[in-house]
Amino acid sequence: MQLTVITILLSLGMEKDNIEWFAIKKPREEGKIERAEVGGKKLCIVLLNGKLYATSSRCPHAGADLSLGWCEGEKLVCSYHRHRFDLQTGKGDEGQGNYIDVFPVKEENSRWYVGIKKSWWKRLLTK
């Protein structure tokens, strides 16, 4: 019994179907942060240098809403305490010791989508 449960748990993390894709609107302005709520997550959507990024919208430092911040280079800057996060990796600047989640983005048929990992329960119950 225990081996079966472990096998199921391991397979849940390795399936290609672990991501659900949700339609999002592409921001109209370069460098402007737009807020979106999809798949139960609050996100920041940023168009920068022609590339679309999606990150979590909560700053891990003090819980501020990152959609109220701005972009500097390829960094998302929190408006509260100026913590900076790489838009591609989510990694905070050196010395911060924190990060934000980043989400995959794709374009299909002239529409944009963000990928959100399915919850453990959802993956278990849809098998």
Image (cartoon, helix red, strand yellow):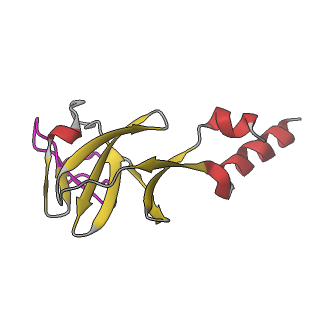
Which residues make up the magenta segment? 77-99
Is any part of residue 98 visible from this angle? Answer: yes
Considering the whole magenta stretch, tell me its main secondary structure.
loop
- Which residue is farthest bottom? 49
Quadrant of the image occupied by residue 35: top left
Where does the C terminus fall, quadrant-wise?
top right
Image vertical order of residue 53 relative to residue 49, above or below: above
Q: Residue at x 14, y 43 (%)?
A: 69
Q: Is residue 19 left or right of residue 85?
A: right
Q: Is residue 6 left or right of residue 90?
A: right
Q: Position of residue 19 (x, y in %)?
A: 58, 50
The one of 118 and 51 positioned closer to us in this rendering: 51
Q: Is residue 39 magenta?
A: no
- Which residue is farthest front? 110
Q: Position of residue 27 (x, y in %)?
A: 26, 53
Q: Residue at x 73, y 37 (%)?
A: 124
Q: Is residue 126 left or right of residue 17?
A: right
- Which residue is farthest top? 63
Q: Position of residue 98 (x, y in %)?
A: 28, 45
